[in-house]
Image (cartoon, rainbow, N blue to C red):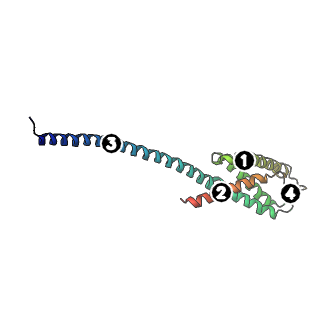
Amino acid sequence: METLTEIAIKIFVEAILITGIIGYFFSKREERMKKTIEEEFSKRDKFFEVRFKFKLRALEELLAPIKLQLIRSKINLTGYDANNEYREKTLKECNETIRSLLLEKGNLIPIDLMPYTEKFISHYDEWLQVYRANREIQNKTNVKHVFTYNFPHDVEKAFLEKFDATERNWKLKGP
């Protein structure tokens, strides 16, 4: 018959083995959970990074150039006098540039600006058509100013506000 000490040693060794085995399974489970959590955070970070890079590209490649062209147009319009060929050509260049940006970089147009984009493109198409008819085809000098009188000021305001908001957001988050 075994002595009390041998029984105590067996129980102690068995307890250590069982605790070690249970501890091993718990540590493996904890490692899997930690890895799963890290993967989820990594996915989330990638998602936000993609969104952030999209906003940055939209700012750099679409909204900033459109803002500059709108400023340039406004400057030209303030000094626009009758049959001023230089100012008209500059205005035409601004209008063509904005139209091209909207059509070529359409994938960068923020969703909330999409309804406005149609108005901008429509206006620029119409203005370019009137300009071409009056200055390039018929060479009308009796038409002192090429205007369509349908400039969408609400669209201009929406684009400029979106630029400002995106720029502010960019400055807050940093590169």
Question: Disc 4 or 2, which lies upstream in sequence?
Answer: 4
Instruction: Give the Cα distance between marks 3 and 2.
Output: 49 Å
Q: Quadrant of the N terminus?
A: top left
Residue that sits furthest to the bottom in the current view: 79
Q: Nearer the viewer, mark 3 or mark 2?
A: 3
Q: Which mark is residue 26?
A: 3
Residue 1 in view, yes or no:
yes
Question: What is the C-alpha distance between the residues marked 1 and 4?
Answer: 25 Å
Which residue is located at x 62 percent, y 60 percent?
168
Task: Classify residue 97 as left or right of residue 19.
Answer: right
Residue under numbered circle 2: 165
User: Does dot 3 land on a helix, a strand or a loop?
Assistant: helix
Judged from the image, the secondary structure of the residue bearing numbered disc 2 is helix
Residue at mark 4 to residue at mark 2: CA–CA distance: 34 Å
The answer to the question of whether label 4 and label 3 lie on touching residues, with beta carbons closer than 8 A, is: no
28, 113: nearer the viewer:
28
Marks 1 and 3 sit apart, C-alpha to C-alpha, by 57 Å
Say what amino acid the circle numbered 3 marks. Phe
Reading the image, the residue beneath label 1 is 117
First of labels 1, 3 by sequence position = 3
Q: Nearer the viewer, mark 1 or mark 4?
A: 1
Relative image position of residue 132 (x, y in whole percent)? 81, 49
Q: 125 left or right of 15? A: right
